[in-house]
Image (cartoon, helix red, strand yellow):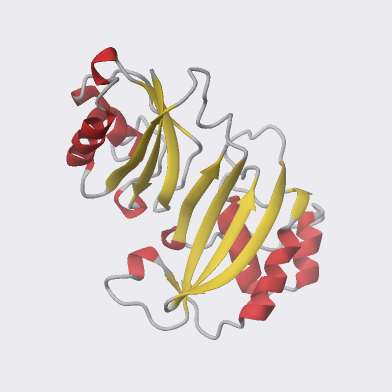
Amino acid sequence: MRVKAVVAYDGSAFHGFQSQTTTPKTVAGALSRAAERLGIHSPIVGSGRTDRGVHATGQVIHFDLPRHWHGARAKLRTMFNRLLMPHIQIKHITPVNERFHARFDAKRRIYRYLLKPTPTTPFDAPYCRHFPGLEERSLAAILRLFEGEHDFALFHKKGSDPGSTVRTVYKTGLYTFGNYRVITFEADGYLRSQVRMMVESALLVMCEEVTEEDIQAQLKGERRFVPPLAPPQALYLARVRY
């Protein structure tokens, strides 16, 4: 029986989501080791990769359950979480069609980037980014530059072949949550580190280090004005829509 699980994790404890040959400290690696201890030998397939240090509140995975777990999903979730604590949590486990694929069936992915106008503390510094003097209306307008279908060839980190570099950003947003300002992106998919580069681009415009025209030129593929990436610790994979 194939199941879909929604997973949250603290990315600061891992070198990214995807399993790697150079380190065991990956989210997928931890999930696979826990599954093996529970008698589950199916591959763990995620909806997509997250960079080192990036968190998730709504990553989606799929795997196949052996028969002895078919009627015990609540117990399975409890056992998984005992093995995965404190840095990973299985939030839900749901039966799905045998052909379901966490990555290829995903329609939209939502990311959040957490800014804090006031100084961070030792307790939230690993999970947000200090950015003072934030003018929300201006930042929201800058973020809207990324909406629509664009060739994001100059908005991703090199090192992998993504095939097409065209992606559609359906919606951007900015809202207040307590003492934080939250940037949101909803798109059909993202290139490697694309979200971090879009965030950094918008914030550099706020700092008057680049202009909106520079961002538009980079979207058109004319020249790269913004090579840096926003720090990873403030980024969250929030939700995957199917």
Q: Residue furthest front?
A: 71
Q: Is 118 displayed left or right of 219 in the figure?
A: left
To which quarter of the image does residue 204 belong? bottom right
Q: In the rendered view, tell whether residue 180 sits above or below residue 65.
A: below
Q: Is 58 displayed left or right of 141 in the figure?
A: left
Residue drawn at point x = 21 percent, y = 38 percent: 78
Q: Is 54 displayed left or right of 149 in the figure?
A: left
Q: Is 71 displayed left or right of 92 in the figure?
A: left
To which quarter of the image does residue 174 belong? bottom right
Q: In the rendered view, tell whether residue 90 sits above or below residue 2.
A: below
Residue drawn at point x = 56 percent, y = 51 percent: 110
**Whole-percent x and y of residue 146?**
72, 59
* Quarter of the picture holding the C terminus: top right
Closer to the camera in the image, 200 or 44: 44
Q: In the rendered view, tell whether residue 57 sits above or below residue 115.
A: above
Closer to the camera in the image, 95 or 31: 95
**Whole-percent x and y of residue 58?**
44, 47
Residue drawn at point x = 56 percent, y = 57 percent: 196
Q: In the rendered view, tell whether residue 75 sits above or below residue 39.
A: below
To which quarter of the image does residue 61 belong? top left
**Whole-percent x and y of residue 90?**
31, 41
**Whole-percent x and y of residue 20?**
38, 32
Q: Is residue 208 visible?
A: no
Q: Residue furthest top?
A: 67
Residue drawn at point x = 47 percent, y = 58 percent: 235
Q: Is residue 236 visible?
A: yes
